[in-house]
Structure formats: structure tokens, C-alpha cells
Amino acid sequence: MTGVIVVPPGQGEQHWQPQPANGWIEVLAAPRFAGAPAGFSAGLQELPPLGKIREHAHPAQTEIFWIVQGQALARLDGSVRRITAGTFMVAPPHARHGFINDGDVPYRMLWMLIPAGLEDFFIAIGRPKGPGLPDPTPYPRPTETGSIELATVFETLDPPPEAPWDTAPITDPSVLEPLRRIAT
């Protein structure tokens, strides 16, 4: 088969993710993969309860999401939204977005980035995930994460994200109550 990529369940390139995500990613398509189309990358990301993706933006990339499982609070260009399985979203360049799993089950989403590059960030800060390898989560973000972000597909936010949308782990679920009340 030329031009078609098939990735069976669990057969992508998998990496554990540090705090505050505390979950894992699986890269399903990337330009460096044999036979993959140039220009985009795709993967799954799973956040355990209280795991989060800090608020961020991409300078030249459009990110597409489809929520596969669970629920989350999302901050999308300043608005807090309730996101549930089956939701589809598109974040164009410079659109701020972040997610917090405020549910009791893992939150899982498919992401696609056009042009590619998000997979390089995940791999650089992650630890390999696979059969026989221990789950290292939670583990702290590498000290060089900021420079890795700027070298891949992230832009500097001004103003920077405020709690709980920042890089600090969430240890007390009660901090999410005010967000739940205002989520649309």
C-alpha cells in the first residue's frame, strides 16, 4: 500500500509525559515516519484525573482535536468550556488553549498539528512507554522544557498563563470548583 498509513491500536510511538500532564502520548503520524505525508503530525494524548495541558499557543500551526474519552475543562482564548467525548475543536495559530481533566476517568484526545512539530516536543520532554517499562509518572518537567517549547511549536504567551492553567500540578481538586461554575 503506497500512501496509506495504518497504525494498529497501541502501535504508535509512545512516551510518558511529565507534570502537570502526568499521562502519555502516542505519536501516530509524523513526517519522519516512513511513508507518512509531510506537513502534519497526529497522535493520542491521555491525561489522568487532575492531569492538565497548560494553556499555550502555537505561532504558525493549526491544532485539531477530537475528544475520544472523558471530560475536561478547557480554556479556549480566555473562555472556560466543558469539553466531553465526541467534541471536535480547531485552534488556529496564536489561539490560546489548555485542558484540565476534572473527571474521574482518563481524558483522551486525538490531536493533529499542521504543520507538524508537536511530536518533537512530546518526545523531547517524555520518557519511553512500552511493555516492561515502568510508569514513571508523576515526574517533574525537565528544566529545559521552556527552551524545548520555543525550539519546537510553542510561542511565548503574554501575559503568561495564570493558575490553574500554568505548569504547576493540581493537587487539590477543589481549586476547580470556580471553573466548573463558569464553564459553558
Image (cartoon, rainbow, N blue to C red):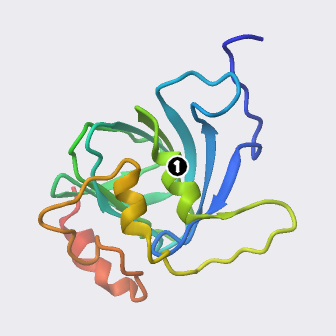
Q: Quadrant of residue 174?
A: bottom left
Q: Position of residue 151 (x, y in %)?
A: 39, 53
Within the image, what quadrant is residue 124 found in? bottom right
Q: Amino acid at mark 1?
A: Asp
The one of 5 and 125 positioned closer to us in this rendering: 125
> Which element carries disc 1, helix, strand or loop?
helix
Q: Which quadrant, please, contains the N terminus?
A: top right
**Relative side of 15 to 142, left or right:** right
Residue 46 at what x, y percent from top left?
56, 58
Q: Residue at x 85, y 61 (%)?
A: 131
Which one is nearer the viewer's eye here, 164 or 4? 4
Q: Residue at x 62, y 34 (%)?
A: 32
Where residue 51 sits: x, y (%)?
47, 71
Q: Is residue 48 visible?
A: yes
Seen in the picture, residue 85 relative to 165 is either above or below; the reply is: above
Residue 110: give x, y in percent of width and height.
Answer: 52, 43
Q: Write the residue at 32% across / 59% down.
A: 98
Q: Which residue is drawn at the image coordinates 43% and 60% (left, top)?
A: 148
**Extreme residue toward the bottom, this view:** 172
Report whether 13 appears left or right of 133: left
Mark 1 lies on residue = 120
**Relative to 145, 130 lies left or right:** right
Q: Which of 152/107 is in front?
A: 152
Farthest residue in the top direction? 2
Direction right: furthest residue: 132
- Quick one: label 1, few (<14), some, or many (20+) residues within 10 Å? some
Q: Is residue 128 positioned above or below 20 on the image?
A: above
> Which quadrant holds the C terminus?
bottom left
